[in-house]
Image: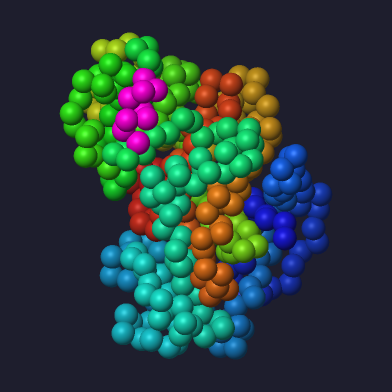
Amino acid sequence: MVPRIHHGMPNAAPRRQRSRKTARDHHHIVFANRHNVKCTLRSRSLNGMGSDDEGGARSGRLVYKIGPDVHPILGQVLDGRGWRSVSGDDDGSWTLNWQHNRFPKSSYMSCAPHQRLNHCQKSSGITKKDALARQLRRMRNTFGKVYDFSPETWILPRERDQLSARFSSNEIWIVKPCASSKGRDIFLATSAQLTESNDLSQMACIVQRYIPNPMLVFGYKCDLRLYVLVKSFQPLKAYLYRRGLARFTTQQYSLDVDTLGNPYCHLTNSSINRFSPSMSDDKGGIGPGCKWTLARFFSNLAERGFNVPRVQRRIRHLVALTLLSVAHEIVPNRNCFELFGFDVLLDCQAKPYYPQSLLACSAQTGSPVGG
């Protein structure tokens, strides 16, 4: 089977007559390498989307059920597209069941053919930093340079001794607790500082080689938040949403050792930078806040002479290869899908690095360009 990443959106509305396709609506890019890891990436228009949902076809209206801890914006969007909601204790009439927490195995077994759940069985591996790092290391050992987007990573506390033996005095590392999110408890340190620290002896975390030359925009470090909906892992079929985000630090980047403890200089998480004293300042070139639309970011790259289509192609390859690394663990089931957020870092040559994946189901909007 050929895994596919589609640049667009999956079918999600009652079927309508499709308009005539143009060369602009569709194009195909095939990526292959000497290890026969092959991905077909399709760009498609958002117009004329149909649906293969059997329940919607029978009733003429799609029905959703969402959990109490899911942000209301999801229901608002579905209502606006003509869906109908049912209460939480309704077990049979829904088409889509969207919950924050994982479903029990019985939920997958009891699904009718037309029903969909928003989590795949055993897909949590891609959302855990240590598990994802382990899978990407395995794939790099097997397939070589095609997986060179993942920087050197060590999983603690199990690999603490190997990491200590690897240290050299002039290196900088970034430490990420396995169970944290939104940038909590992430910090940077030199090899010497980590060697002297006792905090890592029992800490469940990953330690990654810090990318010292990140992409800067007007002197500010940035990364990309991308949204990927996986319709199937076996075969791999996924959709990359066009309207992602570029996220910035709120203080200009510096590699001086004195700045390593400053999160507003090194971390792009908006949940951290919202507390920065310069968050609302009109930062030269960036403006107030810490986010751009993805379209604005790529426009800036193009103005600076970067080959944007090539950068976008490499990002799609990174997404596809990351999903392939965990596809074998996912229980095949046509009644489920998964929505992920990928945080992708570019270096100064616009090479993409290490996706830190997470579930993207909160759907919150905290700024004019999204959450």
Magenta highlight on residue 191: no
Dominant secondary structure (helix, strand or loop) of the stretch shown in magenta: helix
The image quarter in which residue 362 lies: bottom left
Is any atom of residue 70 visible in this view?
Answer: yes
Residue at position x 74%, y 67% from top? 18
Give the image location of residue 165, x and y in percent. 36, 23
Residue at position x 56%, y 57% from top? 327
Q: Is residue 239 left or right of residue 99?
A: right
Number of marks:
0
Residue at position x 56%, y 70% from top? 332
Give the image location of residue 139, x and y in percent. 57, 44
Q: Which residues are magenta?
A: 159-167
Give the image location of residue 265, x and y in percent. 32, 22
- The single residue placed furthest to the left in the displayed view is 198
Is any atom of residue 270 visible in this view?
Answer: no
Q: Is residue 346 above or below residue 344?
A: above
Residue at position x 29%, y 39% from top? 157
Closest to the observer, 72 or 180: 180
Closest to the observer, 166 or 332: 166
The image quarter in which residue 20 lies: bottom right
Closest to the observer, 240 or 79: 240
Quadrant of the snapshot with the N terminus: bottom right
Q: Is residue 319 above or below residue 173?
A: below
Give the image location of residue 56, x and y in percent. 57, 82
Q: Is residue 359 above or below residue 200?
A: below
Closest to the observer, 119 or 58: 119
Q: Is residue 233 above or below residue 364?
A: below
Q: Is residue 33 left or right of residue 269?
A: right
Magenta highlight on residue 166: yes
Colour mapping: rainbow
